[in-house]
Image (spheres, helix red, strand yellow):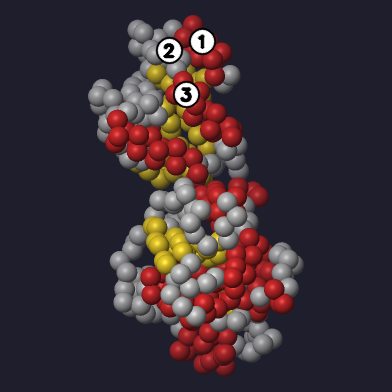
Amino acid sequence: MPGLNATPTSSRLQIAILGRRNAGKSSLINALTTQLVSLVSEIAGTTTDPVRKSMELLPLGPVVFIDTAGIDDSGPLGEMRVKRTYGILHRTDLAILVIDGTSTPSKWEQKILKTIKEKKIPVVGVINKVDTSGYSTAKRKLWEKELGLNLMEVSSLTGQGIEDLKLALIRNAPYHNEKQPLISDLINPGEIVVLVVPIDSAAPKGRLILPQQQVIRDLLDHRAIAVVTREHELQQTLNTLKQKPALIITDSQVFGPVSKIIPPDLPLTSFSIIMARYKGDLQELVTGAKAVAKLKPGDRVLIAEACTHHRQGDDIGTIKVPRWLQKKVGGKLDFNWCTGFDFPPDLKNYKLIIHCAGCMLNRREMLYRIAHATATGLPIVNYGVLIAYLHGILPRALAPFRDLISVSNSDL
């Protein structure tokens, strides 16, 4: 079980290793991590699905290296693997394009490099296998001319150039200085923040869910005081506090009862709304909530969850949200679900996307999903924003962010 000090995968810099089959991608990730992370074989196509390895790369800090299937894979299964490889770019912060130093230029590298640049992903070019007899400096210069990309010479086998490659990654990585704060900009040192954490059958045994862990850690890092309680003990908790809380943060599923306990003068929001701002575009998700008013019975709705988990009897994504939404609409809706990193490329038949908090996705992936939806004119909302809207308390839940988003109470 990861502790509060462990950096979640979704908060790490995502570095994808891309290239043709047998270019030495798996060998390279093993050399970079100094571990046997990926299977290595002379047989092309050994890597069939993305393989991830977390490590510390100072001074960048926590990163995830992602080994991918070859971009030139063939056949029906190969095409699916290539599609997965390109899908990795939706959440890639930094790309490493690996080229076999014994090969000649092809369309494959040009195609994926074009996609990388279109997505504005920083890229480091690597020409591998420079220790072999089939390699020459002339080949590197030919590749550089064809791609318009400087290439670093490395050998995954001997370790030549690996340390220089790490330095290149550090130089080219997009530093996260501009990342949206989680909660630190909403509170001051010494202030009390009350966290309402329900413990039900769906709660993970012996631990808190990731957004709750992250909020607690952010509060501690900024010298605020975190008070954690269940909804049943919330009133008692408030009665015992001598200092007025600066903010109440609740699990979205108990938004209704918690809002009735909290006095109107106390700011209230949810973990999911905080994650909506941290990982995505809160303004766009609030706009998506307005689309609920236009839903009609029979409309098709997509519910997207980033993690795969064992669903309990009163699961939020399959039971609670559909029940609340259909009550609001006044009839049955046609629900579809997607989980994990699979997100439908074709969204034209849906009227609304309802997304989870996205704690297992990085910000790039979440922003891609929002942009993908809005580009097709499809509204998208997340659990916290939707639940607050359905319970008639969205204006109050957004009050802590009034200076950051533009929305009027009359719209909601």
Residue at image location 37% in from the left, 23% down from the top: 23
Viewer-nearest residue: 24 or 71: 71
* Dot 3 alpha-carbon crowd within 10 angstroms: few under 14, some 14 to 19, many 20 or more: many
- What is the x, y in percent for residue 197? 46, 78
* Dot 1 alpha-carbon crowd within 10 angstroms: few under 14, some 14 to 19, many 20 or more: few
Instruction: Give the side of residue 403 with respect to residue 338, left or right.
Output: right
The amino acid marked with disc number 2 is Thr
- What is the x, y in percent for residue 219? 57, 68
The amino acid marked with disc number 3 is Glu
Q: Residue tagged by mark 2? A: 104
Task: Tell me which label, 1 or 3, sits earlier in the chain.
Answer: 3
Residue 280 visible (yes or no)? no
The amino acid marked with disc number 1 is Leu
Q: Residue tagged by mark 3? A: 109
Answer with the quarter of the image where residue 339 lies. bottom left
Task: Tell me which label, 1 or 2, sits earlier in the chain.
Answer: 2
- What is the x, y in percent for residue 8? 45, 55
Judged from the image, the secondary structure of the residue bearing numbered disc 1 is helix
The image quadrant where one finds the C terminus is: bottom right
Q: Tell me if label 1 and label 2 are in contact, CB under 8 Å.
A: yes
Residue at image location 60% in from the left, 68% down from the top: 291
Residue at image location 47% in from the left, 49% down from the top: 346
User: Disc 2 and disc 3: Cα gap in Å?
Assistant: 11 Å
Judged from the image, the secondary structure of the residue bearing numbered disc 2 is loop
User: Disc 1 and disc 2: Cα gap in Å?
Assistant: 8 Å
* Dot 2 alpha-carbon crowd within 10 angstroms: few under 14, some 14 to 19, many 20 or more: few
Q: Residue tagged by mark 1? A: 142
Instruction: Please say if 312 is above or below 129.
Output: below
Answer with the quarter of the image where residue 286 lies. bottom right
Instruction: Please say if 230 is above or below 110.
Output: below
Viewer-nearest residue: 266 or 366: 366
